[in-house]
């Protein structure tokens, strides 16, 4: 079952979607809900459907942790202008 909350969006907050996954499905896959989110984020990033920024947010990982996961799986980075700007901002923040 998939549902979303529109009342938050109407109040200026983004809508949130909720996905119900039966515990038996998670058990069969030998995964936690958190692990499933990581897998979904990696898959959507690999397909080019999510930016690295949105994908690491969905996965609940830091950008560094998410990039490490991609590297371990030998998934090439999709480097876009948005990604370059995020990297430059990080370097400015670090004083480099």
Image (spheres, helix red, strand yellow):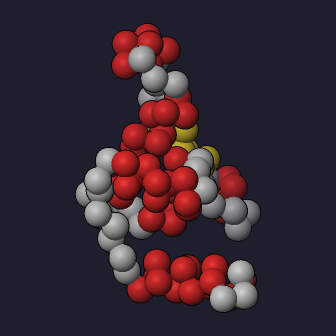
Vertical side of 65 occupied by 40: above or below: above
Closer to the camera in the image, 50 or 96: 96
Residue 48: image location, x then y, percent: 29, 63
Number of labels in the image equals 0
Q: In which quadrant of the rendered image does the C terminus lie?
A: bottom right
Residue located 44% across and 13% down the image: 27
Q: Nearer the viewer, residue 17 or 65?
A: 65
Residue 10: x percent and y percent? 67, 62
Residue 78, by quadrant, is: bottom left
In the image, residue 13 above or below residue 84: above
Query: In the visual, does 10 lie left or right of 66?
Result: right
Relative image position of residue 59 (x, y in whole percent)? 52, 47
Residue, x 63% and y 79% (percent of image)? 90
Quadrant in which the N terminus is drawn: top left
* Res 62 → quadrant: bottom right
* Left or right of 83 in this view: 96: right
Note whether 50 is above or below 69 in the view shown: below
Identity of the residue drawn at 47% across and 84% down: 84
Horizontal side, residue 12 vs residue 47: left or right: right
Can residue 82 be seen in the rendering of this structure? yes
Location of residue 17 by image quarter = top right
């Amino acid at each position: 079952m998939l549902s979303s909350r529109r009342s938050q969006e109407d109040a200026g907050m983004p809508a949130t979607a909720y996905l119900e996954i039966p515990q038996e499905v998670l058990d069969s896959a030998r995964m936690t809900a958190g692990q499933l989110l990581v897998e979904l984020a990696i898959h959507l990033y690999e397909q080019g459907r999510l930016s690295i920024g949105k994908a690491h947010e969905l996965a609940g990982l830091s950008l560094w942790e998410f990039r490490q996961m991609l590297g371990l799986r030998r998934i090439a980075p999709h480097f876009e202008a948005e990604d370059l700007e995020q990297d430059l901002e990080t370097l400015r923040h670090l004083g480099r």
